[in-house]
Every structure is written in structure tokens, then in C-alpha cells.
Image: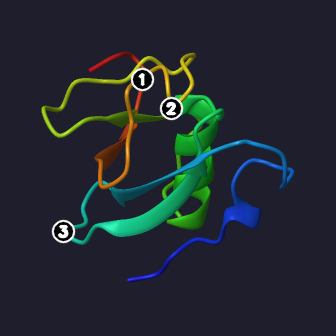
């Protein structure tokens, strides 16, 4: 498994911007990959970064939770309730689920 450093996900460092440590599962993969995101990132931003790092090709990256419910792409990870040890499923949101 590969950990994606914070500097690859969402811009600047410093300040009081908390982070969340999650695992992401890409379509067609059985392996969860650990990621660290800033909680102020939107679901869309974090999913786009994860898709890029995992080489998953989509223009409409999103996340679903363990119950396979799509997270609102416009909410921040904090607003979406994402917390440490959360497992996120990388999805293509084109056309809905």
C-alpha cells in the first residue's frame, strides 16, 4: 500500500487546517490505499486527487461511503462526516449511480 503525502492533496500547508486519514478503494481493486486529506477539501477535490494518484481515469470523480451512498461532492469532507479510518469508494459520478 502507498500513503499519499499531504503535499499532493489540496494545496497549502500550515494553519489550523485539520486532516483526516482515510482509505480509498478504486473500482476494480480489492486493496484499500491510505490517504490523508485536509478536512476543508470538498469531496470532489479529494476524489479528484485520489483518482489522479490511483490512475483512475474519470472527469467526474466522487466518493461513496461503506454503505455505497454517494457523498455530496460540494460538501467539505468535514461536512460529509468523513473521519479517520473511514473507507471511501472512488466512483465515477457521471449520470448518477
Q: Residue at x 83, y 46 (%)?
A: 15
**Marked residue nearer the N-terminal end (1 or 3):** 3
**Crowd band around label 1 with a 10 angstrom C-alpha radius: few (<14), some (14–19), many (20+):** some
Find the residue positioned furthest to the left: 67
**Residue toward you, 2 or 55:** 2
Residue 5 position in % (x across, y down): 65, 71
Secondary structure found at label 1: loop
Find the residue positioned furthest to the front: 16
Q: Residue at x 39, y 16 (%)?
A: 95
Tell me: 85 left or right of 68. right
Q: Which residue is mark 3?
A: 30
**Crowd band around label 2 with a 10 angstrom C-alpha radius: few (<14), some (14–19), many (20+):** many
Q: How much space separates mark 2 and mark 1, taking CA atoms? A: 5 Å
> Looking at the image, how many numbered discs can be counted on the residues?
3
Q: Residue at x 18, y 68 (%)?
A: 30
Residue 66 position in % (x across, y down): 17, 40
Q: How much space separates mark 3 and mark 2, taking CA atoms? A: 23 Å
Q: In which quadrant will I find the N terminus?
A: bottom left
Q: Residue at x 54, y 18 (%)?
A: 75
Secondary structure found at label 2: loop
**Crowd band around label 3 with a 10 angstrom C-alpha radius: few (<14), some (14–19), many (20+):** few
Secondary structure found at label 3: loop
Q: Are marks 2 and 1 in contact (CB under 8 Å)?
A: yes
Which of the 4 quarters of the picture holds residue 76? top right
Q: Which residue is mark 1?
A: 80
**Marked residue nearer the N-terminal end (3 or 2):** 3
Q: Which residue is mark 2?
A: 77
Q: In which quadrant will I find the C terminus?
A: top left
Which of the 4 quarters of the picture holds residue 85? bottom left
Foreground mark, 3 or 2, reads: 2
Foreground mark, 1 or 3, reads: 1
Amino acid at each position: 500500500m502507498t500513503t499519499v503525502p499531504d503535499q499532493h492533496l489540496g494545496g497549502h500547508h500550515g494553519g489550523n487546517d485539520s486532516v483526516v486519514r482515510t482509505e480509498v478503494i478504486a473500482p476494480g481493486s480489492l486493496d484499500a490505499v491510505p490517504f490523508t486529506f485536509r478536512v476543508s477539501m470538498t469531496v470532489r477535490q479529494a476524489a479528484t486527487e485520489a483518482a489522479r494518484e490511483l490512475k483512475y481515469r474519470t472527469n467526474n470523480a466522487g466518493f461513496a461511503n461503506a454503505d455505497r451512498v454517494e457523498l455530496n461532492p460540494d460538501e467539505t469532507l468535514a461536512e460529509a462526516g468523513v473521519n479517520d479510518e473511514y473507507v471511501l469508494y472512488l466512483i465515477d459520478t457521471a449520470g448518477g449511480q
